[in-house]
Amino acid sequence: QDLALLRSANVDYVFLPTNAEIYPAKDDHNYELGDLSKVMEGAFRPGHFNGVASVVKRLFEIVNPTRAYFGLKDFQQYRIIKELNRNYNLGVEVIGCDTVRDEDGLALSSRNRLLSKDEKKLALHLSKTLRLMSENSASLNYIELEKLGKMYLTNYPELEVEYVRVVDPENFEPPTEEIGKGERIALLAAKIGKVRLIDNMKV
């Protein structure tokens, strides 16, 4: 299906290696990614970002790109890759691509295909939560925004909420007074049945 999509976009080349070509030997390296790799996604998926770092570093080394584009829907992963690029002097310009949403506001993801019709309706409350937080960001501090988002989601117990956070987008620390409306970022993750979804929005 991916190859068919690439053909329709007139892509000239596809890199489709085997595991053995990428990893002739097992990569046991523990990558230095800082505290950013230990919170939110890092806390709920231990070791995940080390795996991301292993794959992306090998890709950069093999392809030697000038620029690499990553979706901002997974904002923490994007920041991790920028950290990897800087810490290991990989020399790639890492560019974030804005999240694409459907007409209802749901962030587009291949995982959405796994949702039933009712589950997709439920998933819309994730982006609605973020919009609610954004609409109230001028009058609330980051703690109040997090409480507002969590309170809204309690109306939908079918959603298994893992986190709702508002942070400084550079270091994922609590925003300071200097980081105001439109510069903070709200991130959340929740499970709907067996499908785990993430989303974020500037607030």
Image: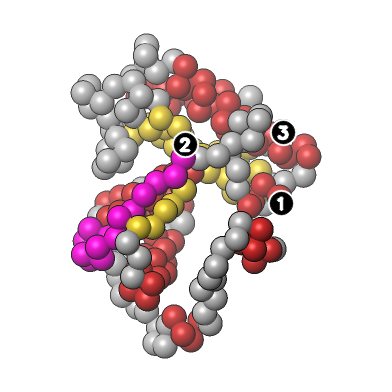
Residue 95 shown in magenta? yes
Q: Which mark is residue 114?
A: 1
Q: What stretch is highlighted in magenta?
A: 84-98
**Disc 2 marks which residue?**
200
Is residue 169 or residue 38 the one in the foreground?
A: 169
Counting residues from the N terminus, which is met first, the one under dot 1 or under dot 2?
1
Q: Identify the element where label 2 is drawn.
A: strand
**26 versus 69 height, above or below:** below
Residue at position x 30%, y 50% in the image: 36
**Disc 3 marks which residue?**
121
Q: Identify the element where label 1 is drawn.
A: helix
Quarter of the picture holding the N terminus = bottom right
Type of amino acid at the residue the image marks with label 1:
Leu
Type of amino acid at the residue the image marks with label 3:
Lys
Gap in angstroms between the C-alphas marked 1 and 2: 20 Å
Local crowd at mark 1 within 10 Å, few (<14), some, or many (≥20)? Answer: few
Q: Residue 89 carries which label?
A: none
Q: Do the residues labelled 2 and 3 touch (CB within 8 Å)?
A: no
Gap in angstroms between the C-alphas marked 1 and 3: 13 Å
Counting residues from the N terminus, which is met first, the one under dot 2 or under dot 3?
3
**49 versus 104 height, above or below:** below
**143 versus 43 height, above or below:** above
Residue 54: image location, x then y, percent: 38, 70
Gap in angstroms between the C-alphas marked 2 and 3: 18 Å
Q: Is residue 2 visible?
A: no
Q: Are marks 1 and 3 in contact (CB under 8 Å)?
A: no
Type of amino acid at the residue the image marks with label 2:
Asn
Horizontally, residue 34 falls left or right of residue 73, namely: left
Q: Is residue 28 visible?
A: yes
Residue 137: image location, x then y, percent: 39, 18
Residue at position x 60%, y 48% in the image: 109
